[in-house]
């Protein structure tokens, strides 16, 4: 042996001897002899070994070596220690912190028609925010520039369609329905809407200044849609098939609004059976169509024709003068007044799951009923399962659908056309 080990035990012998002298460890420290005692300790629930984060036993601590039982504590002192478990306990919170988040109050939101320019611009902003998404690597400046461009384009389109100056909608009557929330005097959203996200983080374009004196009275547009009365919806290839020209107008339908909107007959156009509507009134006091006199020569009949009035019908009758039985079973009411289409249906993400979508649809149903519409249509992207379920829950059914080949030729998603008859909706549900 070297000088540094002379007279001293080494390695395992030194550790065993020291523990034996102190009386805390038994003289036999082989693993085979310790296993029975450990099994009994585990079975009795007095395992004194530490438990790691994953639940597996870890190496014993120094304190447990001195105070443990079984093989680790075979000396004079025997202390039973309960097993240690690493179970995370949730921290206690105060009553205010544990209370649930305040839900927004939908009753503070008003759903109605609007023609105000500032509200129409806010509605255009809501559509731009809902319909357009951008990749994550797009710069903020680029996103803002494109969004402002789309807001201006939507704003111009809404005003042109409502005013009847849009050429594509010259035979349509359009109304914009909005869901508005008035802010308080401090400019904050009341009734839990601020907690829902109607605050400074929302795009400023969605807010409309409604105070004529220039004060800070504002309101926010949370949702919007358009009601389009006409034979078909421009820019959509799927057109409704009902009601047909031979279908009678249901009882109770108010036809007093026929011809009073922007889809009414223009000078020189024929509204029914080839007669010029400038010559006489086409609706009498009883609400039924009457025949007027011709205001021009006979050539004016052929110049305007009745195709514009009955466009979209499966049957198109000739002038009533051809014979008394020629138009038997044919409804004299123009088709442009009997159908309506919904478009640009959207709700801001902060206002979803609050019932605003259903209220917008109910208001649109009331608008269509007031115009004398008999059938209401809406287009849905075929793979948008959420939107399709929403409309089906409201009573819409699929009437027609595009083929995948047809949609691929137009380089856009496939469309479905859903419909339901116009029904009476009470004002309280809007």
Image (tube, rainbow, N blue to C red):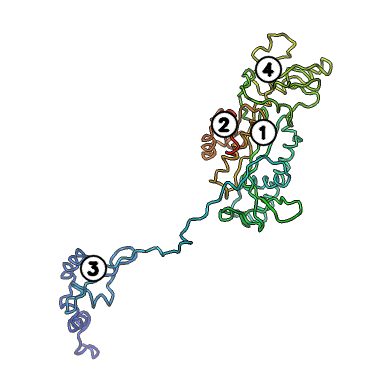
Which is nearer the N-term, disc 2 or disc 4?
4
- The local secondary structure at tag 3 comes to loop
Q: Residue 316 — which label?
A: 4
Q: Position of residue 196 (x, y in %)?
A: 56, 53
Q: Nearer the viewer, mark 1 or mark 4?
A: 1
Q: CA distance from mark 2 to mark 4?
A: 25 Å
Mark 2 or mark 3: name the one nearer the start of the chain.
3
Quadrant assignment for the C terminus:
top right
Label 3 crowd bin: few (<14), some (14–19), many (20+), radius 10 Å: many
Query: Horizontal and vertical percent for residue 83?
Result: 26, 67
Tell me the tag on residue 418.
2
Q: Which residue is mark 3?
A: 47
Query: How busy is the neighbourhood of tag 4: few (under 14 within 10 Å), some, or many (20 plus)?
Result: some
- Number of numbered callouts drawn: 4
Give residue 228's mark: 1
Q: Which residue occupies 17% across, 66% down?
A: 40
Q: Are marks 2 and 4 in contact (CB under 8 Å)?
A: no
1 or 2: mark nearer the eye: 1
């Amino acid at each position: 042996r070297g000088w540094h080990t002379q007279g001293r035990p080494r390695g395992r012998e030194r550790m065993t001897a020291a523990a034996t002298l102190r009386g805390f460890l038994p003289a036999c420290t082989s693993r085979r002899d310790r296993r029975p005692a450990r099994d009994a300790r585990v079975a009795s629930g007095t395992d004194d070994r530490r438990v790691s984060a994953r639940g597996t036993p870890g190496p014993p601590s120094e304190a447990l070596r001195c105070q443990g039982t079984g093989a680790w504590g075979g000396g004079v002192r025997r202390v039973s220690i309960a097993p240690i478990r690493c179970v995370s306990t949730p921290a206690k919170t105060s009553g205010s912190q544990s209370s649930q988040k305040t839900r927004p109050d939908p009753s503070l939101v008003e759903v109605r028609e609007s023609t105000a320019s500032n509200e129409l611009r806010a509605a255009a902003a809501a559509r731009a925010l809902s319909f357009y998404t951008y990749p994550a690597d797009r710069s903020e400046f680029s996103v803002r520039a494109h969004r402002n461009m789309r807001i201006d384009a939507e704003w111009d389109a809404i005003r042109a369609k409502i005013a009847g100056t849009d050429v594509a909608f010259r035979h349509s009557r359009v109304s914009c329905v909005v869901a508005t929330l008035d802010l308080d005097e401090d400019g904050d959203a009341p009734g839990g809407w601020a907690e829902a996200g109607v605050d400074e983080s929302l795009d400023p374009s969605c807010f409309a200044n409604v105070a004529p004196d220039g004060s800070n009275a504002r309101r926010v547009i949370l949702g919007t849609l358009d009601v389009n009365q006409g034979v078909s919806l421009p820019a959509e290839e799927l057109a409704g098939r009902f009601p047909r020209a031979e279908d009678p107008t249901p009882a109770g339908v108010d036809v007093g609004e026929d011809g009073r909107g922007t889809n009414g007959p223009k000078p020189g156009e024929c509204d029914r059976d080839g007669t010029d509507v400038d010559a006489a009134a086409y609706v009498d006091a009883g609400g039924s169509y009457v025949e007027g006199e011709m205001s021009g020569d006979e050539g004016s009949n052929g110049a305007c024709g009745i195709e514009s009035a009955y466009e979209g019908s499966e049957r198109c009758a000739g002038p009533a003068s051809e014979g008394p039985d020629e138009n038997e079973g044919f409804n004299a009411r123009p088709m442009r007044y009997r159908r309506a289409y919904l478009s640009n249906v959207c709700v801001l993400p902060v206002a979803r799951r609050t019932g605003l979508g259903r209220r917008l649809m109910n208001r649109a149903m009331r608008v269509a009923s007031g115009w004398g519409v008999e059938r209401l249509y809406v287009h849905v992207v075929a793979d948008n399962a959420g939107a399709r379920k929403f409309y089906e829950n409201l009573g819409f059914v699929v009437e027609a659908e595009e083929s995948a080949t047809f949609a691929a030729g137009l380089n856009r998603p496939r469309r479905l056309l859903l419909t339901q008859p116009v029904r009476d909706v009470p004002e309280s549900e809007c």
